[in-house]
Image (tube, rainbow, N blue to C red):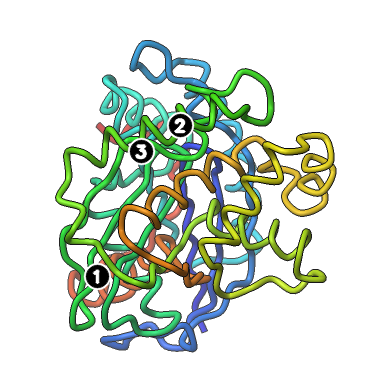
């Protein structure tokens, strides 16, 4: 059974996943067709390396350092193919093309820069391989952006990206570690302004489906604070309200609990929950159904497995040092 590697170069994390695929010659895949051998996350915080809209040389160096570590880990898995894709942090930078070339040259990896629509669509593909979704709306809250997808008759429509995520919300509005009441209101107001440019009625649904680190962090926090350690598969709007309310009412006690539940996301947990709450409110949703699979699995399925079968793609590994991909 072949192994496939996927590196997700995101605004908050750079994550390497290695998947063992039972049969890579199929035309369709579900979560039963592959299993995760490695899921290694590095909290790189690349969005902090954007200055005046430009991705900095320091950001390139930091990305290269993390990718070098992932390349070493990949040697243990003999992957048939390894891909790297990047999302909002590079997509939205004014010097996106130059930054991508610099990272490619330094790392030896080719980088696929996903468009906003691609990212939202692949999130739907991944979420659907977990369990089919026939109708509703899907949200994916990342570090630097939030993707929205309308789902009808089992297919995705109106894929859009809002230029605000949990980490960018923290960086723009929070002075300390946890937001104050005024800072929380500023985060929601900023998101509301971005939503004002959309026809949000398209995404109205009693149930939202959620993927991504911010959604999982909310579930972990709820489990630690209210669920005796059992992570829920669904959160009600009142559950999100409770997390935000606990932070604003007693930040010290909240921080102690958050350090147990999501120590690496303590600063982005509440900004992510504020985005969730605003979306649930504006879309008329009473519950958020959490899906375990997302963009990485969608990329694996559509771009690597199905895509390689169609295009006859070949093995892809880090190239020799100094190899230029211009």
Residue 40: image location, x then y, percent: 64, 55
Location of mark 1 (residue)? 307
Which mark, by number, is residue 125?
A: none
Q: Residue at x 35, y 84 (%)?
A: 132
Instruction: Classify 233 as above or below 243.
Output: below
Give whichever of 225, 97 is nearer the camera. 225
Position of the C terminus, as image quadrant, is top left
Spatial CA distance of label 1 from label 3 is: 23 Å
Q: Secondary structure at mark 3?
A: helix
Q: Secondary structure at mark 2?
A: helix
**Residue ranking furthest to the top:** 52
Q: Residue at x 37, y 58 (%)?
A: 139
Q: Is residue 122 left or right of residue 177?
A: left
Q: Residue at x 49, y 88 (%)?
A: 32
Q: Secondary structure at mark 1?
A: helix
Give whichever of 107, 129 is nearer the camera. 129
Spatial CA distance of label 3 from label 2 is: 18 Å
Location of mark 2 (residue)? 187
Q: Earlier in the sequence, mark 1 or mark 3?
A: 3
Q: Is residue 307 left or right of residue 44?
A: left
Give whichever of 186, 170 is nearer the camera. 186
Residue 34: image location, x then y, percent: 50, 81
């Amino acid at each position: 059974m072949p192994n496939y590697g996927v590196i997700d170069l995101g605004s908050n994390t750079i994550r390497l996943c290695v998947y063992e695929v039972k049969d890579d010659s199929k035309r369709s895949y579900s979560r039963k067709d592959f299993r995760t051998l490695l899921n290694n996350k590095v909290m790189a915080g690349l969005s902090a390396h954007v200055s005046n809209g430009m991705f900095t040389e320091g950001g390139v160096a930091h990305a290269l350092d993390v990718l070098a570590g992932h390349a070493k880990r990949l040697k243990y898995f003999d992957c048939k193919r390894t891909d790297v894709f990047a999302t909002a942090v590079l997509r939205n930078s004014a010097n996106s093309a130059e930054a991508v070339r610099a990272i490619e040259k330094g790392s030896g990896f080719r980088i696929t820069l996903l468009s906003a629509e691609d990212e939202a669509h692949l999130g739907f593909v991944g979420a659907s391989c977990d369990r089919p979704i026939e109708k509703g709306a899907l949200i994916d809250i990342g570090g630097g952006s939030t993707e929205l997808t309308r789902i009808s008759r089992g297919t995705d429509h109106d894929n859009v990206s809002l230029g605000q995520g949990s980490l960018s919300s923290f960086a723009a509005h929070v002075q300390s570690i946890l937001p104050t009441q005024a800072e929380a209101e500023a985060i929601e107001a900023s998101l509301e302004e971005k939503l004002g440019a959309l026809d949000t009625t398209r995404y109205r649904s009693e149930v939202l489906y959620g993927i991504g680190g911010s959604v999982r962090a909310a579930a972990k926090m709820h489990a630690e604070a209210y669920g005796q350690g059992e992570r829920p598969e669904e959160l009600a709007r009142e559950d999100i309200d409770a997390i935000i309310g606990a932070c604003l009412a007693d930040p010290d006690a909240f921080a102690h609990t958050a350090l147990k539940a999501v120590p690496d996301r303590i600063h982005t947990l509440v900004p992510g929950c504020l985005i969730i709450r605003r979306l649930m409110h504006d879309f008329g949703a009473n519950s958020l159904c959490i899906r375990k699979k997302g963009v990485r699995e969608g990329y694996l399925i559509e771009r690597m497995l199905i895509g390689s079968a169609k295009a006859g793609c070949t093995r892809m590994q880090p190239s020799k040092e100094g190899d230029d991909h211009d």
